Image (cartoon, rainbow, N blue to C red):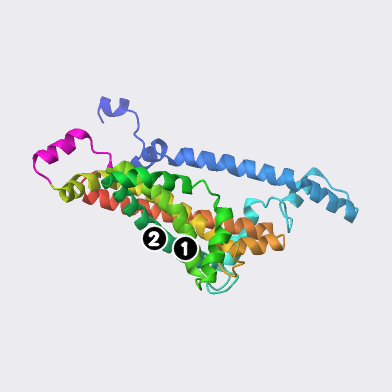
Amino acid sequence: MTTEALSAPARKPAFLTRLVEGRAVPVLMVSLAILILWYLGAVYMNADLQIDQFERQKVEWTTADLVRGTLSQERPLLPAPHQILAEMWKTIFEVRPTSKRSLIYHSSVTLSSTLLGFAIGSLLGILLAVGIVEARTLDKSLLPWIISSQTIPILAIAPMIIVVLGSIGLKGLVPKSIISTYLCFFPVAIGMVKGLRSPDLLQMDLMRTYSATRWQLFRMLRWPSAVPFLFASLKIAIAISLVGAIVGELPTGAQAGLGARLLAGSYYGQTIQIWSALITASILAACLVALVGLVERIVLRAMGMRE
Protein backbone atom coordinates (compact mmCIF):
# COMPACT_ATOMS: atom_id res chain seq x y z
CA MET A 1 0.00 0.00 0.00
CA THR A 2 1.42 3.40 -1.02
CA THR A 3 2.02 6.35 1.27
CA GLU A 4 -0.62 8.40 -0.60
CA ALA A 5 -3.21 5.70 -0.01
CA LEU A 6 -2.44 5.65 3.71
CA SER A 7 -2.56 9.42 4.08
CA ALA A 8 -5.72 9.95 1.97
CA PRO A 9 -8.87 10.43 4.04
CA ALA A 10 -11.50 7.70 3.86
CA ARG A 11 -14.20 8.55 1.37
CA LYS A 12 -17.83 8.39 2.37
CA PRO A 13 -20.11 6.17 0.31
CA ALA A 14 -21.80 8.03 -2.50
CA PHE A 15 -25.24 7.36 -0.99
CA LEU A 16 -24.30 8.95 2.35
CA THR A 17 -22.71 11.91 0.58
CA ARG A 18 -25.87 12.58 -1.41
CA LEU A 19 -27.96 12.11 1.74
CA VAL A 20 -25.96 14.68 3.70
CA GLU A 21 -25.62 17.18 0.88
CA GLY A 22 -29.21 16.83 -0.30
CA ARG A 23 -32.53 17.78 1.24
CA ALA A 24 -33.14 14.57 3.21
CA VAL A 25 -31.37 15.61 6.42
CA PRO A 26 -32.98 19.09 6.67
CA VAL A 27 -36.41 17.61 5.96
CA LEU A 28 -35.90 14.92 8.62
CA MET A 29 -34.75 17.48 11.17
CA VAL A 30 -37.76 19.72 10.53
CA SER A 31 -40.07 16.69 10.69
CA LEU A 32 -38.56 15.63 14.00
CA ALA A 33 -38.99 19.14 15.42
CA ILE A 34 -42.65 19.22 14.30
CA LEU A 35 -43.23 15.78 15.85
CA ILE A 36 -41.77 16.88 19.20
CA LEU A 37 -43.81 20.09 19.22
CA TRP A 38 -46.91 18.12 18.28
CA TYR A 39 -46.54 15.75 21.24
CA LEU A 40 -45.87 18.66 23.60
CA GLY A 41 -48.94 20.46 22.26
CA ALA A 42 -51.08 17.34 22.68
CA VAL A 43 -50.00 17.00 26.31
CA TYR A 44 -50.63 20.68 27.03
CA MET A 45 -54.02 20.97 25.29
CA ASN A 46 -55.42 17.70 26.67
CA ALA A 47 -54.12 18.15 30.21
CA ASP A 48 -57.20 19.91 31.60
CA LEU A 49 -59.55 17.23 30.28
CA GLN A 50 -57.38 14.51 31.74
CA ILE A 51 -57.14 16.23 35.14
CA ASP A 52 -60.93 16.57 35.24
CA GLN A 53 -61.23 12.88 34.43
CA PHE A 54 -58.84 11.97 37.27
CA GLU A 55 -60.81 14.15 39.69
CA ARG A 56 -64.13 12.59 38.70
CA GLN A 57 -62.65 9.15 39.15
CA LYS A 58 -61.11 10.26 42.49
CA VAL A 59 -57.77 8.63 41.80
CA GLU A 60 -54.28 9.78 42.66
CA TRP A 61 -52.11 10.55 39.68
CA THR A 62 -48.57 11.52 38.85
CA THR A 63 -47.09 13.52 36.01
CA ALA A 64 -46.34 10.30 34.13
CA ASP A 65 -49.98 9.25 34.50
CA LEU A 66 -51.08 12.66 33.20
CA VAL A 67 -48.82 12.42 30.14
CA ARG A 68 -49.98 8.89 29.34
CA GLY A 69 -53.59 9.92 29.78
CA THR A 70 -53.34 12.97 27.53
CA LEU A 71 -51.85 10.83 24.76
CA SER A 72 -54.50 8.12 24.91
CA GLN A 73 -57.82 9.98 25.23
CA GLU A 74 -60.74 8.80 23.12
CA ARG A 75 -61.78 12.32 22.05
CA PRO A 76 -58.79 14.61 22.64
CA LEU A 77 -58.67 18.26 21.70
CA LEU A 78 -55.43 17.56 19.83
CA PRO A 79 -54.78 13.91 18.96
CA ALA A 80 -51.24 12.61 19.26
CA PRO A 81 -49.52 11.49 16.04
CA HIS A 82 -49.61 7.81 17.01
CA GLN A 83 -53.39 8.01 17.55
CA ILE A 84 -53.85 9.44 14.05
CA LEU A 85 -51.60 6.80 12.52
CA ALA A 86 -53.53 4.07 14.32
CA GLU A 87 -56.82 5.43 12.98
CA MET A 88 -55.39 5.65 9.46
CA TRP A 89 -54.07 2.09 9.66
CA LYS A 90 -57.47 0.85 10.80
CA THR A 91 -59.45 2.73 8.13
CA ILE A 92 -57.03 2.00 5.27
CA PHE A 93 -55.70 -1.51 5.82
CA GLU A 94 -58.18 -3.21 8.17
CA VAL A 95 -61.40 -2.50 6.25
CA ARG A 96 -62.44 -3.23 2.69
CA PRO A 97 -61.63 -0.43 0.21
CA THR A 98 -65.31 -0.29 -0.77
CA SER A 99 -66.48 0.16 2.82
CA LYS A 100 -67.98 3.49 3.89
CA ARG A 101 -65.47 3.44 6.76
CA SER A 102 -62.48 3.17 4.44
CA LEU A 103 -60.33 6.24 3.78
CA ILE A 104 -59.44 4.70 0.42
CA TYR A 105 -63.09 4.82 -0.57
CA HIS A 106 -63.51 8.42 0.58
CA SER A 107 -60.23 9.45 -1.06
CA SER A 108 -61.31 7.95 -4.38
CA VAL A 109 -64.55 9.95 -4.30
CA THR A 110 -62.70 13.19 -3.61
CA LEU A 111 -59.99 12.33 -6.13
CA SER A 112 -62.47 11.87 -8.97
CA SER A 113 -63.86 15.41 -8.58
CA THR A 114 -60.34 16.74 -8.03
CA LEU A 115 -59.02 15.34 -11.30
CA LEU A 116 -62.06 16.44 -13.29
CA GLY A 117 -61.88 19.96 -11.89
CA PHE A 118 -58.12 20.04 -12.44
CA ALA A 119 -58.48 18.99 -16.07
CA ILE A 120 -61.20 21.55 -16.80
CA GLY A 121 -59.45 24.32 -14.85
CA SER A 122 -56.07 23.69 -16.48
CA LEU A 123 -57.56 23.73 -19.97
CA LEU A 124 -59.55 26.86 -19.17
CA GLY A 125 -56.49 28.58 -17.72
CA ILE A 126 -54.37 27.78 -20.77
CA LEU A 127 -57.04 29.01 -23.19
CA LEU A 128 -57.52 32.23 -21.22
CA ALA A 129 -53.77 32.84 -21.12
CA VAL A 130 -53.41 32.33 -24.86
CA GLY A 131 -56.29 34.71 -25.51
CA ILE A 132 -54.87 37.34 -23.16
CA VAL A 133 -51.42 37.19 -24.75
CA GLU A 134 -52.60 37.09 -28.35
CA ALA A 135 -55.46 39.62 -28.07
CA ARG A 136 -54.74 43.01 -26.52
CA THR A 137 -58.45 43.60 -25.93
CA LEU A 138 -58.69 40.52 -23.71
CA ASP A 139 -55.56 41.62 -21.88
CA LYS A 140 -57.18 44.92 -20.94
CA SER A 141 -60.68 43.62 -20.26
CA LEU A 142 -60.40 40.01 -19.06
CA LEU A 143 -57.27 39.87 -16.91
CA PRO A 144 -58.56 42.27 -14.21
CA TRP A 145 -61.72 40.17 -13.85
CA ILE A 146 -59.69 36.98 -13.56
CA ILE A 147 -57.67 38.50 -10.73
CA SER A 148 -60.69 39.97 -8.95
CA SER A 149 -62.53 36.63 -9.14
CA GLN A 150 -60.12 35.20 -6.59
CA THR A 151 -61.02 37.80 -3.98
CA ILE A 152 -64.33 36.02 -3.31
CA PRO A 153 -63.98 33.52 -0.42
CA ILE A 154 -64.59 30.01 -1.71
CA LEU A 155 -66.55 29.12 1.46
CA ALA A 156 -69.03 31.85 0.55
CA ILE A 157 -69.42 30.98 -3.11
CA ALA A 158 -69.41 27.16 -2.80
CA PRO A 159 -72.98 26.86 -1.40
CA MET A 160 -74.22 29.21 -4.10
CA ILE A 161 -72.65 27.08 -6.82
CA ILE A 162 -74.13 23.92 -5.30
CA VAL A 163 -77.63 25.44 -5.10
CA VAL A 164 -77.59 26.94 -8.61
CA LEU A 165 -76.27 23.80 -10.27
CA GLY A 166 -78.62 21.62 -8.23
CA SER A 167 -81.61 23.66 -9.43
CA ILE A 168 -80.81 22.72 -13.03
CA GLY A 169 -80.26 19.06 -12.20
CA LEU A 170 -76.47 18.98 -11.88
CA LYS A 171 -75.59 17.11 -8.68
CA GLY A 172 -72.88 14.85 -7.36
CA LEU A 173 -69.54 15.01 -9.13
CA VAL A 174 -70.09 18.05 -11.37
CA PRO A 175 -70.70 20.78 -8.72
CA LYS A 176 -67.63 19.72 -6.75
CA SER A 177 -65.48 19.69 -9.88
CA ILE A 178 -66.76 23.17 -10.81
CA ILE A 179 -65.56 24.48 -7.45
CA SER A 180 -62.18 22.84 -8.08
CA THR A 181 -62.14 24.44 -11.53
CA TYR A 182 -62.88 27.85 -10.02
CA LEU A 183 -59.87 27.56 -7.72
CA CYS A 184 -57.31 25.94 -10.01
CA PHE A 185 -57.79 27.85 -13.28
CA PHE A 186 -56.33 31.04 -11.77
CA PRO A 187 -52.71 29.91 -11.11
CA VAL A 188 -52.61 28.21 -14.52
CA ALA A 189 -53.86 31.32 -16.32
CA ILE A 190 -51.49 33.69 -14.52
CA GLY A 191 -48.51 31.34 -14.85
CA MET A 192 -49.13 30.78 -18.54
CA VAL A 193 -49.49 34.52 -19.22
CA LYS A 194 -46.10 35.02 -17.58
CA GLY A 195 -44.61 32.11 -19.51
CA LEU A 196 -45.99 33.10 -22.90
CA ARG A 197 -44.56 36.58 -22.42
CA SER A 198 -41.18 35.33 -21.19
CA PRO A 199 -39.33 35.39 -24.59
CA ASP A 200 -37.33 38.61 -24.85
CA LEU A 201 -37.60 41.13 -27.66
CA LEU A 202 -34.44 39.94 -29.41
CA GLN A 203 -35.85 36.45 -29.78
CA MET A 204 -39.14 37.82 -31.05
CA ASP A 205 -37.41 40.10 -33.55
CA LEU A 206 -35.23 37.23 -34.76
CA MET A 207 -38.29 35.10 -35.46
CA ARG A 208 -39.90 37.97 -37.33
CA THR A 209 -36.81 38.44 -39.51
CA TYR A 210 -37.34 34.84 -40.61
CA SER A 211 -40.89 35.83 -41.65
CA ALA A 212 -42.40 33.58 -38.98
CA THR A 213 -46.18 33.57 -38.86
CA ARG A 214 -48.09 34.21 -35.67
CA TRP A 215 -48.74 30.49 -35.29
CA GLN A 216 -45.06 29.64 -35.84
CA LEU A 217 -44.07 32.30 -33.32
CA PHE A 218 -46.41 30.73 -30.79
CA ARG A 219 -45.47 27.12 -31.51
CA MET A 220 -41.70 27.54 -31.77
CA LEU A 221 -41.01 30.28 -29.23
CA ARG A 222 -43.86 31.22 -26.90
CA TRP A 223 -45.10 27.72 -26.05
CA PRO A 224 -41.69 26.10 -25.35
CA SER A 225 -40.77 29.10 -23.17
CA ALA A 226 -44.04 28.74 -21.25
CA VAL A 227 -43.79 25.01 -20.49
CA PRO A 228 -41.70 25.40 -17.27
CA PHE A 229 -44.15 28.08 -16.07
CA LEU A 230 -47.04 25.76 -16.94
CA PHE A 231 -45.79 22.91 -14.78
CA ALA A 232 -45.01 25.23 -11.88
CA SER A 233 -48.61 26.43 -12.08
CA LEU A 234 -49.99 22.90 -12.44
CA LYS A 235 -48.34 21.86 -9.16
CA ILE A 236 -50.20 24.63 -7.38
CA ALA A 237 -53.40 23.94 -9.30
CA ILE A 238 -53.54 20.20 -8.52
CA ALA A 239 -53.15 20.85 -4.79
CA ILE A 240 -55.72 23.64 -4.68
CA SER A 241 -58.07 21.56 -6.80
CA LEU A 242 -58.11 18.96 -4.02
CA VAL A 243 -58.97 21.71 -1.55
CA GLY A 244 -61.83 22.80 -3.79
CA ALA A 245 -63.19 19.27 -4.01
CA ILE A 246 -63.17 18.93 -0.21
CA VAL A 247 -64.81 22.35 0.24
CA GLY A 248 -67.43 21.36 -2.33
CA GLU A 249 -68.38 18.35 -0.24
CA LEU A 250 -69.04 20.38 2.90
CA PRO A 251 -72.21 22.38 2.02
CA THR A 252 -73.85 19.40 0.31
CA GLY A 253 -73.81 17.16 3.37
CA ALA A 254 -72.14 14.55 1.19
CA GLN A 255 -72.10 10.95 2.40
CA ALA A 256 -68.79 10.12 0.71
CA GLY A 257 -65.48 11.91 0.28
CA LEU A 258 -62.86 13.34 2.61
CA GLY A 259 -65.09 16.38 3.18
CA ALA A 260 -67.89 14.07 4.30
CA ARG A 261 -65.43 12.36 6.62
CA LEU A 262 -64.55 15.73 8.13
CA LEU A 263 -68.23 16.59 8.58
CA ALA A 264 -69.02 13.29 10.27
CA GLY A 265 -66.09 13.72 12.62
CA SER A 266 -67.16 17.26 13.55
CA TYR A 267 -70.77 16.18 14.17
CA TYR A 268 -69.78 13.49 16.67
CA GLY A 269 -66.70 15.15 18.13
CA GLN A 270 -64.36 12.53 16.67
CA THR A 271 -61.22 14.63 16.46
CA ILE A 272 -59.04 11.64 15.64
CA GLN A 273 -61.24 10.91 12.62
CA ILE A 274 -61.00 14.56 11.55
CA TRP A 275 -57.23 14.61 11.77
CA SER A 276 -56.85 11.28 9.98
CA ALA A 277 -58.90 12.66 7.08
CA LEU A 278 -56.78 15.82 7.04
CA ILE A 279 -53.50 13.89 7.01
CA THR A 280 -54.85 11.60 4.29
CA ALA A 281 -55.78 14.65 2.21
CA SER A 282 -52.30 16.10 2.64
CA ILE A 283 -50.68 12.81 1.60
CA LEU A 284 -52.98 12.62 -1.42
CA ALA A 285 -52.07 16.19 -2.38
CA ALA A 286 -48.36 15.44 -2.03
CA CYS A 287 -48.72 12.39 -4.28
CA LEU A 288 -50.57 14.42 -6.92
CA VAL A 289 -47.92 17.16 -6.86
CA ALA A 290 -45.18 14.53 -7.12
CA LEU A 291 -46.97 12.98 -10.11
CA VAL A 292 -47.09 16.36 -11.86
CA GLY A 293 -43.40 16.80 -11.06
CA LEU A 294 -42.62 13.42 -12.61
CA VAL A 295 -44.47 14.38 -15.78
CA GLU A 296 -42.59 17.68 -15.78
CA ARG A 297 -39.21 15.95 -15.71
CA ILE A 298 -40.21 13.63 -18.53
CA VAL A 299 -41.54 16.46 -20.72
CA LEU A 300 -38.62 18.82 -20.11
CA ARG A 301 -36.12 16.06 -20.74
CA ALA A 302 -37.86 15.23 -24.01
CA MET A 303 -37.70 18.91 -24.95
CA GLY A 304 -33.99 18.98 -24.12
CA MET A 305 -34.35 21.66 -21.45
CA ARG A 306 -32.70 19.80 -18.59
CA GLU A 307 -31.62 16.36 -17.47
SS class, disc 1: helix
Classify residue 261 by image quadrant: bottom right
In the rendered structure, the answer to whether residue 143 lies left or right of residue 220 reads right
Task: Looking at the picture, tell me which residue is in the foreground, 192 or 82.
Answer: 192
Residue at position x 47%, y 45% in the image:
148
In the rendered structure, the answer to whether residue 213 lies left or right of residue 284 reads left
Give the magenta range. Answer: 197-212
Mark 1 and mark 2 lie on one chain; the one further toward the N terminus is 2
Q: Position of residue 227 (x, y in %)?
A: 28, 47
Q: Which residue is mark 2?
A: 120
Q: Dot 2, how many residues are within 10 Å of its Cα: few (below 14), some (14-19), or many (20+)?
A: some
Tags 1 and 2 touching, CB below 8 Å: yes
Magenta span contains residue 97: no
Classify residue 139 by image quadrant: top left
Q: Position of residue 235 (x, y in %)?
A: 40, 50
Q: Which residue is mark 1?
A: 177
In the rendered structure, the answer to whether residue 73 lies left or right of residue 278 reads right
The vertical placement of 251 against 222, above or below, is: below
In the rendered structure, the answer to whether residue 149 lies left or right of residue 230 reads right
* Count of numbered marks: 2
Residue at position x 15%, y 36% in the image:
205
Give the amino acid at mark 1. Answer: Ser
Q: CA distance from mark 1 to mark 2?
A: 8 Å
Specify whether residue 170 is in view: yes
